[in-house]
Image (cartoon, rainbow, N blue to C red):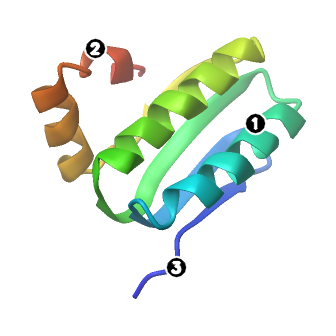
Amino acid sequence: MTESAVRLGDAGQLYISGVLDYRSGPGLRKHGQALIKSSAAPELVLDCSAVTKSSSVGLSLLLCFIRDAEAAKKTVSIRALPEDMREIAEVSGLTELLAHP
């Protein structure tokens, strides 16, 4: 089983990894929010390239992180959105909200 994690890179990248589900979501949410607040970078890149599996919880996390970044006056982009998250976004009608470069 892959351990889930969120960590902040030097240039404002928020690296999200592992399985995003109801078990990992609350901890990742809390930790990611604190990392976003602590970052001095003017931009935030949500890097999902290491996400191995996601339920709708992963999509909810991304939306929360986008909201946190915007509240901190940071521009946001998403890198490497996994196919399962993209499909959930399409079914949920949230594709536009995730259409960050």
Q: CA distance from mark 1 to mark 2?
A: 22 Å
Q: What amino acid is found at the position of numbered circle 1 in the picture? A: Ile
Q: Is residue 100 left or right of residue 4?
A: left
Q: What amino acid is found at the position of numbered circle 2 in the picture? A: Glu
Taking the spot 52% from the left edge, 79% from the top edge, the residue there is 3
Q: Quadrant of the C terminus?
A: top left
Q: Is residue 25 left or right of residue 91?
A: right
The image quarter containing residue 40 is top right
Total labels drawn: 3
Mark nearer the N terminus (1 vs 2): 1
The image quarter containing residue 95 is top left
Mark nearer the N terminus (1 vs 3): 3
Q: What amino acid is found at the position of numbered circle 3 in the picture? A: Glu
Mark nearer the N terminus (2 vs 3): 3
Secondary structure of residue under mark 2? helix
Asked if the residue under mark 3 is in contact with the one under mark 1, i.e. CB atoms within 8 Å, the reply is no
Residue on which the image places disc 1: 36
Task: Give the vertical position of 84 relative to 51 (above or below).
Answer: above
Residue on which the image places disc 3: 3
Is residue 94 among the parts visible in the rendering? yes
